[in-house]
Image: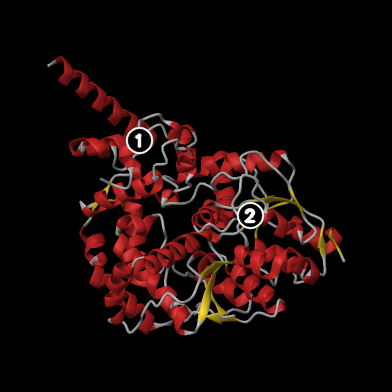
Amino acid sequence: MISNIERCYQCGQCTSVCPMGEQEQTYRIRRFLQMEKLGLETEESMVVPFIFYCTTCYKCQDNCPQGVNLVDAVLAIREKAVHKGKMLEAHKKVGQMLINYGHAVPTNTDAMEKRGLLGLEERPPTVQASIEGLSEIKTLMRLTGFDKLVAESEVEEQLTENAAMVQQADFTQQQVAEEKA
Amino acid sequence: MSNLSLFLGCVAPNRYPGIEAATKKTFSKLGIELDDLEGASCCPAPGVFRSFDKTTWLTLASRNIALSEEMDDDLLTICNGCYSTLKEAETELKKDSGLKKEVNEKLFETGHEFRGQHDVRHVIEYLYQNIGVDGIREIVSNQLDLRVAVHYGCHLVQPLKEAGSGLVTNDITFFDELVEATGAKSIDYEDKMMCCGAGGGARAAVQDATLRITEKKLQNMIEEQVDCIVNACPFCHLQFDSGQQDINKNSGTNYEIPVLHYTQLLGLAMGFSPEELGINLNSTNTAVFIQRIKEGFVTA
């Protein structure tokens, strides 16, 4: 089991202080934890893409009466999803940036111009100015299989809140129908 | 005492190079030479890459630390996200020899080794512990007469808490103390310790929701009539600075709060001009702020 999530007793103190939970009805940490505990992988659509909305601010963890390592748990649930080929389009792009340039946020003409105004080298002394350095990190990403992981992941639709609510409503109806049957 | 290498990360050199310039200038004034960390990469970012594949995250992080160790340097970060990644990687690898061996097997393929004999430092924590509030006060030549909204950022606080630094208490003050050492006043505001909204890959995943989190913080700051926001992280900096423009565009609002990294605030107090520190290069217009600084908003 991931981290120490067996200690969660579903009190909801995590969501009560979660800044993302306040903005997005679909972002409910305790639900992700409970689904993970119960192994409800068939209802994955209730977790992906929402699990990727966490800002990792640790407020939930600070507020958890059971001392659950909530951020580790959220990240580990994400990692499982990614390893099953589920990634958000925006995150896949960030992954490709790292693979191609060695930076999640690589330079651009605007940055190079600003650096010039400040008397800094046009390219910072990172992998962006080192072919050898870039080749090293490409080697490492090949050894860990990260290049393949990103290349082979499907792209998950990034749902707006409304679309997510519709999806949630469908899910609830389905549950009701199953219970009746 | 070992020397320091400057770990740049992504957002500072590639979006807000003023933070890089300010760090070099202020440290030089403090008599500390920062070595370039040639060939360093993305830390890699803790929220996204750690959650995509922990092995990749740890391997690339350990290479960055190894580059610094090869120069016999401690590694200095100017970003909370980089601090979170590199501090956690350092701690895990120092504690777990099996994991260290596993990572090093990969690093050997590129001619590097994580030895674990140096430390990862955050610029705020370094200034507080190694220079001290009195040390900052002594070197400041311009007393800044500013009302400042201090934004600590989640990934400055959490790694320091986990490392048992003693700096993180219920009444957390170390960053405020450093700000006040420049003559500025740190103004209390509601939900001060709340997230900027950007972290964990959320900015890429659900930008609108992250901007609503940011806007709440901005409103709380405006309520207290602050002159600027001072942060310790280029990604929080981006979310506040470029975020204000996004919010203005989306909602027809008129947010215009200047956003400064602490090294830029310190630079002003050391007598560097706003232009030398790149404060004029923000997305949000800082012309009024700069004018006021130049007209003696600071007192010598």
> In the orientation shown, which residue stands out farthest toward the left?
A181
In the picture, the disc for residue A8 is 1
User: Is residue B115 rendered to the left or right of residue B234?
Assistant: left
Quarter of the rendering containing residue B91: bottom left
Splitting the image into 4 quarters, where does residue B170 fall? top right
On the image, the x and y values in percent for residue B19 come to 61, 67
Q: Tag 2: Cα neighbours inside 10 Å, few (<14), some, or many (≥20)?
A: some
Residue at image position (24%, 72%) is: A142
Q: Depth check: give the residue in front, A147 or A112.
A: A147
Marked residue chain, label 1: A
Q: Horizontal and vertical percent for residue A99?
A: 32, 69
Q: Can you identify the residue that label 2 sits on?
A: B284
Give whichever of A100, B56 is nearer the camera. B56
Q: Is residue A179 left or right of residue A37?
A: left
In this orientation, which residue lies closer to the viewer: B281 or A143? Answer: A143
Identified by mark 1, the residue type is: Cys
Q: Looking at the image, is A18 positioned above or below residue B104?
A: above
Name which residue type carries label 2: Thr
Report crowding for label 1: few under 14, some 14 to 19, many 20 or more residues within 10 A (C-alpha).
Answer: some
- Locate residue A101, reporting x and y percent: 37, 72
Depth check: A31 or A97 in front?
A31
